[in-house]
Image (cartoon, rainbow, N blue to C red):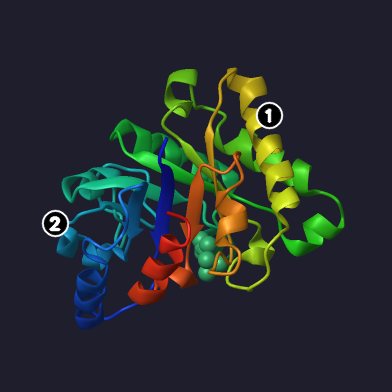
Amino acid sequence: MKKLIVANLKMNFTKEEMIDYIKGIKNQISNNFEVVICPSFVYLSMFQNFDYKIGAQDVFYFVQGSYTGEVSPIQLKSLGVSHIIVGHSERRKYFKEDDLLIGKKIKAILKQNIKPIFCVGETLTERQLKKTTNILKNQLLIALKDISKEEIKDIIIAYEPVWAIGSGITPTANQIKEVILYIKKVIMNKYNLEIKVLYGGSVNKENIKSIINLEEVAGLLIGSSSLDPNYFISMLDLIV
Ligand code: PEP
């Protein structure tokens, strides 16, 4: 099974910079990986006839209507989006998204046959207070409360410790393994099946090998290290 590499470009690049970025990564990433590039909504239509899959960084849960400023799963589908990141810690922190809202988004994404990349993770304080497993269990079970066994098969979970995102600090390989096994156990207990779990948070050239080599890690969600095409490509070359 190919490992999944998801680039979260966040709110970066002007249109001209995006054109350069697309040129920079075109045909450069090994097809040993399944690659999903997630630019801002406004640039998605620039990725037609692209060599990799495209993803969105968020979505609203209604199909259409009077929701000024929002973007729906069906609109994203019409642009060729195959994956949507949902529940990212930046959405939780800056836009006060909670587990119930995230659950509604996941449901709406699945209805359009798009794969949700559902992010979960604990803060540093929560880890220090040894609450990591409790926090993750709540995040998972609340957001997935209306998700059926049929639907869960299409969901990809991303374990993203909040304290690792953009900080340059990563958990040890053992800590990652421990948490991912826990997430898989929660899903196994509820649905009796295995789910793909990605790791995300400060992946870089120094740590990528030790993380991707973990059998439990189905792939990576990469922020900062995906922004410079040369860095991104040479980092992925290390693990081909
Ligand atoms: C992210 O925000 O999903 C992420 C993984 O960011 P970074 O790689 O910059 O920590």
The label number, if any, that marks residue 185 in the structure image: 1
- The local secondary structure at tag 2 comes to loop
186 relative to 24, above or below: above
137 relative to 147, above or below: below
Residue at 68%, 36% in the rendered image: 181
Q: Position of residue 35 (x, y in %)?
A: 34, 51
Instruction: Work out whether residue 128 or residue 74 is closer to the camera in this orientation and state it.
Output: 128
- The local secondary structure at tag 1 comes to helix
Q: Residues within 10 Å of mark 2 (few under 14, many from 20)?
A: few
Please identify the quarter of the rendering in which residue 202 is found. Answer: bottom right
Q: Position of residue 89 (x, y in %)?
A: 57, 59
Give the mark nearest the N terminus, 1 or 2: 2
- Screen quadrant of the C terminus: bottom left
Residue 9 appears in the picture as rendered: no
Residue at the left extreme of this rendering: 49
- Screen quadrant of the N terminus: top left
Residue at 47%, 39% in the rendered image: 156
Q: Position of residue 2 (x, y in %)?
A: 40, 40
Q: Amino acid at mark 2?
A: Gln
146 relative to 134, above or below: above
Q: Amino acid at mark 1?
A: Lys
The label number, if any, that marks residue 48 in the structure image: 2
Q: How far is mark 1 from mark 2, CA to CA?
A: 38 Å
Q: Is residue 229 left or right of residue 197?
A: left
